[in-house]
Amino acid sequence: MKTKLLSILPYAAVAFIVIYSAFKYDAKHKQQATVRAQEQVAQERELLYSFTADFEAGEKLNFVPSEAIKFAGNSAAIVAKEGIYGPTFSCDSLALLNKVKRVEVSLMLYVEAPNKDATIVLSFDNETRNLIYKSAGMMDGFKANEWVHVKSKFEINAETFEHEKKLIFKAYTMNSGGDKFFIDNFEVKLFSTK
Amino acid sequence: MEQKNNKSLIAAWAIVFAILLAHFYNPRTTEGDYKRELTFDTFSYYLYLPATFIYDDIALTKQDTLHALFNKYEPSPTFYQIFQIENGNWTPNYTCGFAMLWSPFFAIAHLWASLSDYPVDGLSFPYQFCIAFGSILLILPGIFFVRKTLLRFFSDGVAALTMLFLVLGTNYFHEAFDDYLQPHAILFTGYAMLMYYTMLWHDTFKRKYAVYCGFLMGIMILLRPSEILCVFIPLLWNVYDKQSLLDKIKNVKDNFSHLLFAALAAFVVVIPQLIYWKVVTDSFLFFSYQRTEGFDFLHPHIWNSLFSFKKSWFIYTPIIIFPLLGIFLLRKKKKEVYYPIVVFTAFNFYLLCSWAAWWNGGSYGMRYFTESYSVLALPFGFVISAIGTSKWWVKSSLYLVLTALTALNLFQTWQYVNWIIPCDRMNWAYYKQIWLKTEVSDEDRSLMEIQRSISATEEFTNEQDYSKKTIGFFNYETVNSEFVDANRCDTFSLSKPYSYRYGANEEWGPTFSIRYDNLVKEDKDHVWLRVSLDYFAGADINENPASLVINMPHGDYLLKYKAFDLQKRPFKPNEWNHVVVDYMTPFPYMESDKMEIYIWHRGKKNFYIDNFHIEAFEKK
């Protein structure tokens, strides 16, 4: 019995190698296919509008300045739980917003301790109610007392507001309860598909 | 008591796992991820399966679909794997043996693709993976059949050592783990099985072994028709003198039904091919190798095949000298197998050396020879056996030599899969520069043979590195135009008073030809040719088309045939136009072959050429 089992072993090993390879390379191909699909989507995307705030003198957004802690230039913006909302980008161009399929928000973030209440928020509202509300946490790449790059992508279903007569889009950071944090180089990009 | 023969069994499995390990750690495999397996010639062997079972297009007439598939997966730079025949159908260059062997793996792949998100197109990942692994699974049993045969003649230890040296010491190893979709390692299995069942039939006279032999010979011939030489093995087995010949004839007569069954088995295997040819070509027999280089039977490339540093048997697989010497031992030690092995080996060697592209295309070493190694296993076994019984210092020295040659083969195999040894650009200067090196510089690589373009286009970009000379200039008025038919000179010309006129239905005019060895010096491997001329085609070149053709014919085969279509180039109507093309000379099949340069006029109106100028650029 033992000898018989031993004699089967090499055949089993070859069979295992073949099946294992099939699964391994199948997974690899699927991963590559996903990346290719994402790249294709990215290539098919068209940048409609780009907004950047570096929180220096002359900044159009309202913000609480921080001169001691900043990523670049002379100042950054403080987002504290007392004020809840950080500097907010807004846009009410119906022609532009009706084409939006994707929004990307990126910023530099500085925190002293993890803050699960620190979020990036997007909202699309008409005159009376909210149509789309999306948020994303910012602690994925958390490092205490260091500037880290945070980037969030939001897919937008424009059909939700295609018949609206008036529309306002907002993108902002929010601190709903934790320690204050600092942001710099706040960037919002609106994309459509080609 | 049953003998266990553990050493040879362990050796066989060690070889199997060495092949699998080498396969998985092969940089060429890991880079490819089984995405580009069915390429070049393999694509031609394989095309029967998707054409028949997916596209319902056995005659390959859905050219748009085929070209779309070709463009998506790019199996080669040009679509050379099929050609059109007189009735309008298309056929692959090669026979359908591999498609038949691969069909179970194709079925698995098809099921896999159908149940997943992969395209069910015959070339997506499941197909490439299953055919690749299917081939490896067809290769591995060859090791065990060689073992079985060796054990009938030798001790367990000799069988083990013979297998290890035969596989790890030769380019078979590379064929098995890296070049598995080429026919050679699979044919090694075929020969190993044929040797074994031939031996069993002669020992037992059981009909089933005759059927196995017939089946194997049928499939091997279908894989590559040149394997017809395999018939020498059963035919001459046990024949070594007049009496043994008479005995053989008597045995065959006594078992005549076996011969018929063997022939039937061989015939059954080739039936699909015969049906395919009947359906596609209207004939049961068809020569599909029309577009291949062909054989130089009267001028076999023996020296190059044995000793060239570009590619040769003794330089890249030196251990093979031992089994070849072992053939002489057979006569003394086992005369029953002497004639089948010596006759097969001699004819096979002559055949392979006669192939015009004697360097075997892209490969590590002489790949065409690897299938015969399972036949050479027996003489190798006798050499190993003789070494084992020799004086200690002879034994030690020869084992040392065998081990060193095995190590050299494995190291050079490593160099090959790591792109240090190129597949067809080796020469002596580069060989000695990289010998036993694990890293090579760009300076080292510059010693290789020139990189030739395998795509449809090539570009001469480094003119400054070459010196130029005119090798032909024909303005059709002076004595240098003596090869021109004076009756076709015309007073309508760019350079007065004459040009050369192609009449309304005249396709051919003067051809400039020069022998390769008069054009390219012995110490050089190429020149660039620059051909320029002025031509007048009337109002519309598309209505009066012509091509500037450059090629080097070798018998009926047109080596590196390039037709530069003038209608695809800038053209001014009713004016003299000037055209310039560059062309690198190919690696010659024979240095006495001639380069030919001429105009091929296909239009129905007068066409004029003048100032036909040919320059050669030689590397400084």
Image (tube, helix red, strand yellow):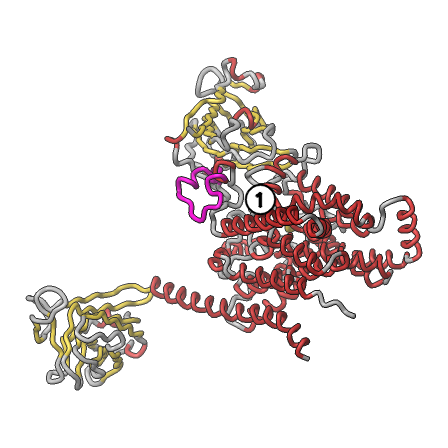
Question: Hey, which quadrant is residue B206 in on the image?
Answer: bottom right
Instruction: State whether residue B102 appears in this view.
Output: no
- The range drawn in magenta is B432-452
Callout 1 secondary element: helix
Q: Does the magenta segment cover residue B284?
A: no
**In the figure, is residue B279 to the left or right of B594?**
right
Q: Who's the residue at 87% across and 60% down the image?
A: B205
Query: The C terminus of chain B appears in which quarter of the rendering?
Result: top left
Q: Judge by depth and name the residue closer to the eye, B435 or B128.
A: B435
Instruction: Where is residue B357? Give x, y as percent.
Output: 61, 40
User: Closest to the observer: B69 or B351?
Assistant: B351
Image location of residue B379, percent across then percent down:
72, 49
Q: At 31% from the left edge and 74% from the top edge, which residue is drawn?
A: A155
Q: Seen in the image, is B531 located left or right of residue B10?
A: left
Classify mark 1: residues with Cα within 10 Å, few (<14), some (14-19) or many (20+).
many
Residue A50: name its quadrant.
Answer: bottom left
